[in-house]
Image (cartoon, rainbow, N blue to C red):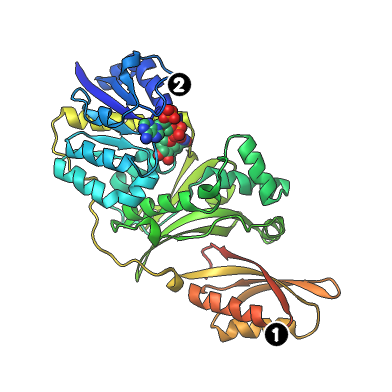
């Protein structure tokens, strides 16, 4: 029998589910793959805690190094999360010649090149399908199936919590705080939602997607990031009126000048495939000259779907280990130009509160024109003293858009710039 000893760091939402399935579905997995995947050692913070699986107690330890250093462990699965000590444990495992599977986007986005290089030196796989999109197969399609495609862009809804919140705001008219509280009550958002609502989680995923799509390493700090905390029901309603929906997008693009990655809320046309992705679902839209458009969608988180992605990697890595293959990394990274976000062309929706009197629109339009930004459409609603002025611009570089809005904010009749949201559509 092709037996592989597995060591698992972390037995929480994903690890606990994975172990339950490795034990409970052992015969079925073995029949389908020819592999005997045996869980030999597990590290958790609290070994005495109740777990969703039954294994002899002596296999559960509090010291994660006891898993990595265990001679009976052939393959390590890292599901504890965070950068430390997960990073050093993964590094030690690959340096010891043990294949590693992880779901840790934070770690891969922060230390990817170093860990991938270490795995290459040892000739072992380092797989992380579950790090982006939970149960959606996306890492393997981008880095292997599409290795021959000159991918042009990857645009995704990669954070289920924020998509749930934005869907609630769009469909129920809820405010941000109300929708967040609902997401927390339903278990979609953590007690501390910062990483989700401020875009940090999506930025780590954008960095990984950009790196794999373009073969140029993009670090998480290279990703321009804006969250959803400033999105209001008013902008949701205006977006709907103009045929758009607001989503938090992770965008990676290969332009003539180089590669760029960013995370920000964006208005997308109702007809765009990502516009119909509701609730906690994730979806990733990939374009290239030969494939045209591909859409990957499904459950972006949760113990069961994520454990399925991890299991696929475990089976893949176990096969290579048994074949005694000297494994080359799935993808090689070469230096490339990372473009500063201020030079990327985008379109902006700007909501202004202004004095309701003649000549204001001309002044605002003049400020945009002076900054080199041309206006695509304008909508104005007066209420006597005050008026709401909505402007959607044509494409212009970020720096020019920013300069235009800063200049508009200084105009005497402009009371405030109430909102700025980018518009993502194929139009110029
Ligand atoms: N949850 C998802 O839907 C999802 C989806 C995609 C990717 N991921 C990624 O998968 C990883 C795991 O997420 P999760 O939701 O399963 O996390 P989790 O429920 O918090 O579980 C973490 C596990 O690691 C253990 N642990 C943490 N620090 C430890 C340490 N220093 N020593 C020993 N054990 C330690 C914990 O022990 P105790 O149980 O004793 O506390 C727990 O069993 C993360 O990288 C996450 O980003 C999760």
The quadrant of the picture showing ligand 1 is top left
**Structural distance between the alpha carbons of marks 2 and 1:** 67 Å
State left or right for residue 426 relative to residue 421: left
Q: Secondary structure at mark 1?
A: helix
* Point 34% across, 66% down: residue: 338
Q: Residue 93 appears at what percent x and percent y?
A: 22, 36
Mark with earlier residue (2, 1): 2
Q: Residue 363 appears at what percent x and percent y?
A: 69, 85
**On screen, residue 91 above or below 49:** below
* Point 29% across, 39% down: residue: 127
**On screen, residue 322 above or below 203:** above
* Point 21% across, 27% down: residue: 74
Q: Which residue in the rendered view is the most extreme toward the right?
A: 384
**Would you call the spot at circle 1 few (<14 residues within 10 Å), some (14-19), or many (20 or more)?**
few
Q: Residue 205 appears at what percent x and percent y?
A: 42, 49
Q: Look at the image and tell me in which quarter the N terminus lies.
A: top left
Judge: label 2 CB < 8 Å from ligand 1.
yes
Mark 2, residue position: 49
* Point 18% across, 40% down: residue: 95
Mark 1, residue position: 362
């Amino acid at each position: 029998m092709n037996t592989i000893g597995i060591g698992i760091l972390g037995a929480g939402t994903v690890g606990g589910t994975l172990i339950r399935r490795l034990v409970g579905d052992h015969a079925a997995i073995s029949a389908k793959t020819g592999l005997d995947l045996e869980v030999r050692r597990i590290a958790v913070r609290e070994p005495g805690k109740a777990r969703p699986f039954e294994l002899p107690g002596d296999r559960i330890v509090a010291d994660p190094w006891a898993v990595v250093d265990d001679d009976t462990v052939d393959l390590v699965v890292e599901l504890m999360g965070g950068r430390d000590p997960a990073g050093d444990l993964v590094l030690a495992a690959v340096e010891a010649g043990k294949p590693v599977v992880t779901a840790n986007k934070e770690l891969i986005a922060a230390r990817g090149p170093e860990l991938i290089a270490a795995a290459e030196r040892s000739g072992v796989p380092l797989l992380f399908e579950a790090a982006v999109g939970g149960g959606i197969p996306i890492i393997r399609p981008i880095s292997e199936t599409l290795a021959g495609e000159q991918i042009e862009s990857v645009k995704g809804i990669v954070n289920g919590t924020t998509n749930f919140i934005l869907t609630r705001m769009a469909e129920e008219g809820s405010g941000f705080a109300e929708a967040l509280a609902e997401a927390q009550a339903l278990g979609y958002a953590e007690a501390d939602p910062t990483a989700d609502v401020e875009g940090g989680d999506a930025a780590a995923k954008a960095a990984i997607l950009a790196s794999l799509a373009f073969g140029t390493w993009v670090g998480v700090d290279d990703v321009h990031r804006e969250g959803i905390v400033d999105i209001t029901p008013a902008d949701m309603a205006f977006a709907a009126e103009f045929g758009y929906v607001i989503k938090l997008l992770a965008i990676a693009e290969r332009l003539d000048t180089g590669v760029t990655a960013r995370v920000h809320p964006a208005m997308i046309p109702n007809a765009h495939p990502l516009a119909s992705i509701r609730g906690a679902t994730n979806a990733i839209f990939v374009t290239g000259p030969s494939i045209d458009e591909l859409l990957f969608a499904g459950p972006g988180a949760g113990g069961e779907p994520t454990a399925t992605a991890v299991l696929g990697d475990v089976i893949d890595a176990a096969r290579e280990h048994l074949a005694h293959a000297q494994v080359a990394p799935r993808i090689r990274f070469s230096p490339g130009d990372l473009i500063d976000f201020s030079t990327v062309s985008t379109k902006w929706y700007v909501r202004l509160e202004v004095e309701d009197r003649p000549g204001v629109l001309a002044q605002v339009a003049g400020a945009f024109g002076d900054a080199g930004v041309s206006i695509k459409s304008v909508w104005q609603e007066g209420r006597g003293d005050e008026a709401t002025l909505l402007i959607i611009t044509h494409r212009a570089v970020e720096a020019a858009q920013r300069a235009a809005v800063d200049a508009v904010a200084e105009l005497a009749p402009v009371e405030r710039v109430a909102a700025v949201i980018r518009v993502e559509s194929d139009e110029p």
